[in-house]
Image (cartoon, grey):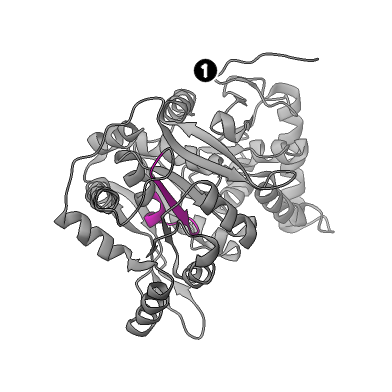
């Protein structure tokens, strides 16, 4: 699995890799920089080695204890560069990454920590107190690492509270400093070695963990890269789908392997369009709920009354292009693409070349609208499971463009067996 990142590192060592919008103000409201700030592949490589070396030294020294089967590392935060850096460190140093997320609920978080025997959790600062408060129920937990810098007073409070519960509270920069002092080379994993455990809430009872190996993930990522639509060199991906789930996570593996860039959202769904317009991505992984919002926003114009002006032009453009799509499969129109649909494309930054839809079925009308609106963009739909590393079947660029309601054929790395028809 680390070879995916190392492939990107070889292609794009001094080029941007992980980006975020810096916070400018917190009072009276949080505001963000208009542009993304980037870390290069070389900078991320240095940081993943520092974090990985620190983790290895903690386990070797006994500060952290190995579980029954592996050395587990938890992550509890929204998507951000530090999430990816910690995950890359786990991959490189043969640690098993286990993601936690808010919708699991406090009881489920406690269950996952104990079930996977997680001695250390990297998290955003808003989760530190909850982890300390539940320390008695999670005796295996010995260290909490804050992704966020802590002020002097807050740090003292958390460190003192942690000591009372037998938990060492650190900032990420301290972990990186420890790693630089105790630098060690990455630990090569075997193909069948567990890389991560991805928990879902499950339909009944306690959360269920899907155990995925280095071979599972590397094969899925490379297989999916094989079928990616044509994109520019070092393409940009927008990261907002929770990394605690496998869908967005596997896309990030793909982008890292080809030397692309990953820009993270600011954490607030209300800022999603502002983030994506600042980033101007080429790859936009999505779920139907997000794509439905884009469709409904556009349809407000199409359904507005009147026969003059922009509303009429929009209705005419949509009707013409849908008729062409259903008759010939064509998604281009010399007039309407320039006059009308450039504005729709600008909603996602103006240079998207691939939109993927997964996790649930998408309405055929929404899919058709995306096809005619985002000219020169492949709009794909697929089906997969956590157990198949998100990818199972998917539509392909040379499929019949007039077809809707299909999840396409099998991915190149999958085998299917029909048990019952």
Q: Is mark 1 on a helix, strand or loop?
A: loop
In the rendered image, which residue does mark 1 sit on? 412
Among the 4 quarters of the image, the one containing residue 1 = top left
Q: Is residue 71 magenta?
A: yes
Question: Residue 178: percent from the left, percent from the top?
Answer: 21, 59
Over which residues does the magenta segment extend?
Answer: 70-84
Q: Does the image show residue 258? A: no
Compared across the picture, whether 302 is left or right of 188 comes to right
If the image is split into quadrants, where does the C terminus sit? Answer: top right
Q: Residue at x 64, y 38 (%)?
A: 358
Residue 371 lies, with reference to residue 59, above or below; the image says: above
Along the viewing direction, whichever of 378 and 198 lies nearer the viewer: 198
Q: Is residue 65 left or right of residue 373?
A: left
Question: Dividing the picture into quarters, in which one does residue 190 lie?
Answer: top left
Q: Is residue 31 above or below residue 290?
A: below
Q: Residue at x 75, y 56 (%)?
A: 301
Residue at (25, 34) in percent of width and height: 11
Of residues 277 and 206, the one nearer the viewer is 206
In this rendering, the count of numbered labels is 1
Residue 414 on image: x %, y %: 55, 19
Crowd tier of the residue under label 1, counting other residues whose Cα lies within 10 Å: few below 14, some 14–19, many 20 or above: some
- Decide: is 214 above or below 305: above
Residue 407, quarter of picture: top right
Query: Relative to 273, is 4 above or below?
Result: above
């Amino acid at each position: 699995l680390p070879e995916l990142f190392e492939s990107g590192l070889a292609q794009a060592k001094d080029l941007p890799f992980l980006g975020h919008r810096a916070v400018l103000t917190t009072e009276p409201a949080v505001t963000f920089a208009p542009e993304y700030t980037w870390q290069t592949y070389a900078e991320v490589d240095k940081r993943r080695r520092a974090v990985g070396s620190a983790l290895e030294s903690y386990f070797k020294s006994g500060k952290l204890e190995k579980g029954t089967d592996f050395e587990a590392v938890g992550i509890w935060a929204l998507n951000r560069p530090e999430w990816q850096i910690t995950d890359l460190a786990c991959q490189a140093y043969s640690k098993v990454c286990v993601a936690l997320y808010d919708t699991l609920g406090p009881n489920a978080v406690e269950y996952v920590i104990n079930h996977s025997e997680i001695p250390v959790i990297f998290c955003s600062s808003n989760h530190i107190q909850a982890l300390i408060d539940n320390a008695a129920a999670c005796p295996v937990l010995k260290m909490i690492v804050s992704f966020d810098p802590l002020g002097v007073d807050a740090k003292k409070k958390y460190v003192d509270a942690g000591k009372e519960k037998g938990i060492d509270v650190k900032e990420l920069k301290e972990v990186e400093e420890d790693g630089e002092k105790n630098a060690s080379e990455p630990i090569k994993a075997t193909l069948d070695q567990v890389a991560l455990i991805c928990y879902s809430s499950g339909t009944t009872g306690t959360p269920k963990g899907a155990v995925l190996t280095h071979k599972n993930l590397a094969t899925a990522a490379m297989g999916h890269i094989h079928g990616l639509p044509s994109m520019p060199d070092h393409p940009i991906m927008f990261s907002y789908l929770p990394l605690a789930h496998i869908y967005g996570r596997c896309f990030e593996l793909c982008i890292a392997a080809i030397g692309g860039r990953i820009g993270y959202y600011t954490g607030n769904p209300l800022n999603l369009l502002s983030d994506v317009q600042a980033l101007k991505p080429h790859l936009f992984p999505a779920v139907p709920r997000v794509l439905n919002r884009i469709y409904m926003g556009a349809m407000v114009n199409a359904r507005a009354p009147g026969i003059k002006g922009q509303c009429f032009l929009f209705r005419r453009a949509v009707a013409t292009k849908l008729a062409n799509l259903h008759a010939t499969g064509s998604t281009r129109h010399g007039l309407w693409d320039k006059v009308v649909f450039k504005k729709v494309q600008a909603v996602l930054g103006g240079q998207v070349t691939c939109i993927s839809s997964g996790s649930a079925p998408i309405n055929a009308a929404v899919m058709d609208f995306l096809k005619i609106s985002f000219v020169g963009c492949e709009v794909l739909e697929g089906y997969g499971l956590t157990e198949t590393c998100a990818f199972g079947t998917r539509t392909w660029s040379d499929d019949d463009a007039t077809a809707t309601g299909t999840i396409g054929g099998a991915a190149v790395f999958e085998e299917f067996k029909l048990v019952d028809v």
